[in-house]
Image (cartoon, rainbow, N blue to C red):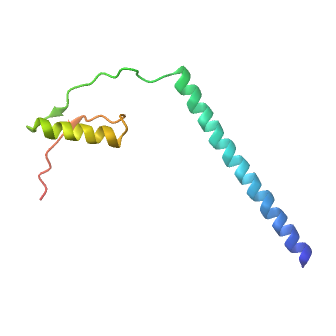
Amino acid sequence: MSEAYSTAITLLFVGMFTVFTILASVVLMGKFIIFIINKFFPGELNPTIKPIASNVLINKKTLSAIVAAVEIVTKGKGRITEIKKNNDK
């Protein structure tokens, strides 16, 4: 019985090491591919800021607060494309 447990524990550790190695290689290859893509195919460096399409009249302070909140939450990558008033009550 002891030999069976020894074999089971050996297989357990070999399997866990194999899974760890494969997952680590997937993560490292993904990071490498992202690095290469960003290095040779950079995104738009100076995106043009388009005016926000809005059918609703909105206070400038409110609009600046919305823009600031979106910029903070999305870390500068989000853009507001449209503002709609929600009439659900």
On screen, residue 63 versus residue 4, left or right, reads: left
The x, y position of residue 14, in whole percent, is 80, 57
> Image height check: is 63 above or below 46?
below
On screen, residue 29 versus residue 39, left or right, reads: right
Q: Quadrant of residue 69?
A: top left
On-image quarter of the C terminus: bottom left
> Image height check: is 4 above or below 44?
below
Seen at 82% across and 63% down, the residue is: 11
Seen at 65% across and 42% down, the residue is: 26
On-image quarter of the N terminus: bottom right
Farthest right residue? 3
Q: Quadrant of residue 15?
A: bottom right
Seen at 87% across and 70% down, the residue is: 6
Farthest left residue? 57
On screen, residue 21 versus residue 72, left or right, reads: right
The x, y position of residue 38, in whole percent, is 52, 26
Q: Quadrant of residue 2?
A: bottom right
Q: Nearer the viewer, residue 67 or 88?
A: 67
The x, y position of residue 3, in whole percent, is 91, 73
Q: Is residue 35 visible?
A: yes
> Image height check: is 21 above or below 34?
below
Q: How many marks?
A: 0
Farthest bottom residue? 1
The x, y position of residue 77, in whole percent, is 37, 34
Q: Is residue 55 visible?
A: no
